Image (spheres, rainbow, N blue to C red):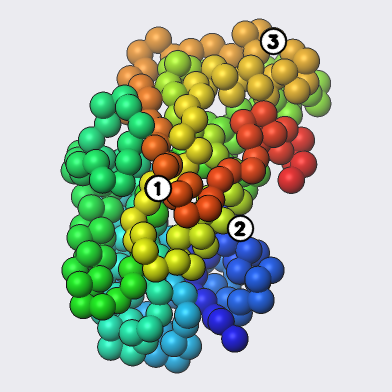
Amino acid sequence: MYNAIIFGANGQDGYYLNRLLQAKGIKVVCASRKGDGLHLDVSNYQAVSTLIELHKPTYIFHLAANSTTRHDAAMENHATISTGTLNILESVTKYSPLSKVFLSGSGLQFVNKGLPIKETDDFFANSPYSVSRIHSVYAARYYRSLGIKVYVGYFFNHESPLRPERHMSKKIALFTKRILAGHNEQMEIGDISVMKEWTFAGDVVEAIYTLVTQDHIFEATIGSGLAYSIKDWLNQCFGIIDKDWKNYIYEKSDFTPEYSVLYSDPSTIKSIGWDQKVDFSSLAKMMVLDNE
């Protein structure tokens, strides 16, 4: 029987991945610093190595991260992403060399010229977060040279009803629900012209599984390849409740976005059989109406 360990199991990706693996008959150990499942810090080598030696899993997924580019998260990013990756890969080398390891990467670790980003594009260490992600990839490539099957999936913006409210997608969806419920309020947001992907997290974990169940491609950007603006998201969400968002939303006048557009070239992951199932409008309905 196949088994798996998910580090960082309590985020939206961990939830959907756990559900997918169990549906395929795979026994899953969920590890995270908090929440349900096994409480474990991936930056603790002894804890990681003991768990991997005990279970010798078929698959290991490293999804743990604080997905922020803020400088004050530099040490946390390093511990969770960089050190966590080394802890997993060294433990696999010593105790479970047949395990397949998946590491999450990010579109934010690449040079962004406003064009679709592919896994073969150049990295750009422009934040502590991207530094940790880049380090993780080079560690993967080194351990791959030692014979360990290490996969990297570079994630772009992806959503679900499980998104925390600090994310703009969920913030707008919840605001739309309050307006639907009869509240009369306004919300200030940043530059609504910013364009990014809005892929469903459940589709993204299908891509992860597609990647780790083959042995020819080891790095791929994972996303829809379709960019929509925050304004597009407002139109979709408020269209569901048949109201004009312009009556409730106003933009910050002094806001500078981190980027103007960020989206992927998913040709590699699509070449091995994956494609998204949930489109932009269906995702908006899912998040506004809680209709998964």
Cα–Cα span, label 2 and label 3: 33 Å
Indicate the secondary structure of the residue bearing disc 2.
helix
Q: Residues within 10 Å of mark 3 (few under 14, many from 20)?
A: few
Q: Residue sitting at 59 percent across and 14 percent down?
A: 249
Q: Is residue 110 above or below residue 37?
A: above
Q: Residues within 10 Å of mark 1 (few under 14, many from 20)?
A: some
Given residues 86 and 227, the one toward you in this image is 227
- Which amino acid, by three-letter code, is at mark 2? Tyr
**Residue annotated with mark 1:** 268
Q: Position of residue 254 (x, y in %)?
A: 35, 13
- Which amino acid, by three-letter code, is at mark 3? Asp
Cα–Cα span, label 1 and label 2: 22 Å
Cα–Cα span, label 3 and label 1: 39 Å
Q: Which mark is residue 16?
A: 2
Indicate the secondary structure of the residue bearing disc 3.
loop
Q: Residue sitting at 69 percent across and 68 percent down?
A: 23
